[in-house]
Amino acid sequence: MNQLASFEIDYASGLPVWIQVKNRIAYLIGAGEYAPGDQLPTVRALAVSLDISYNTVNRAYMDLEREGYIVTRKGRGTFVVERREVGAARATDNAIELLADDLIRTCSHAGMADDDIVALVEARLAHRALG
């Protein structure tokens, strides 16, 4: 089963496509939709499925591997890893908290200060309330 089949890229979000793909996969792993040992779609298959560039998916996979979510085994595929290093403190985190952590990490990597991240979230909440 491909949990990414219903995923749609939001081109109006302003968030780069590779980060949207990365965030979705990290979310699915955190939510338990992909368990340790599960094989992810190949880079090429996911690119075709989402109608995006191979390089975009590859960049998302490389970042997920660097962050310890997945491992690529040459000739075998890409698999979800057991996240032992996450520790007991993270074991109680739910999928929403993992998504928030990923948002914070992504914003920090983009050079945003903590106050700017909070302001961004507040602005998005205000926008949602209006719309």
Image (tube, helix red, strand yellow):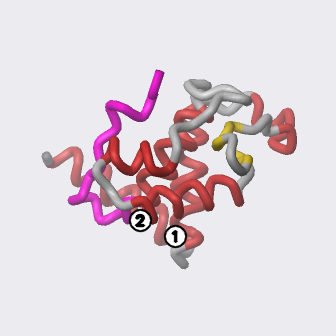
| 5 part of magenta stretch | yes
Say which residue appears at 67% left-offset and 33% top-offset.
93
Q: CA distance from mark 1 to mark 2?
A: 6 Å
Q: On residue 115, which mark appears?
A: 1
Say which residue appears at 24% left-offset and 58% top-offset.
11
Q: Amino acid at mark 1?
A: Asp
Q: Is residue 46 left or right of residue 107?
A: left
Q: Is residue 26 left or right of residue 3?
A: right
C-beta proximity under 8 Å, tags 1 and 2: yes
Q: Residues within 10 Å of mark 1 (few under 14, many from 20)?
A: few
Above or below, 56 relative to 68 = below
Q: On residue 119, which mark appears?
A: 2
Is residue 118 in view from this perspective? Answer: yes
Say which residue appears at 40% left-offset and 56% top-offset.
121
Q: On residue 38, which mark appears?
A: none
Magenta: main secondary structure equals: loop
Q: Position of residue 20 (x, y in %)?
A: 41, 53
Start and end of the magenta stretch?
Answer: 1-17
Q: Residue furthest front?
A: 75
Q: Amino acid at mark 2?
A: Ala
Above or below, 116 relative to 4 = below
* Front position in the image: 55 or 84: 55
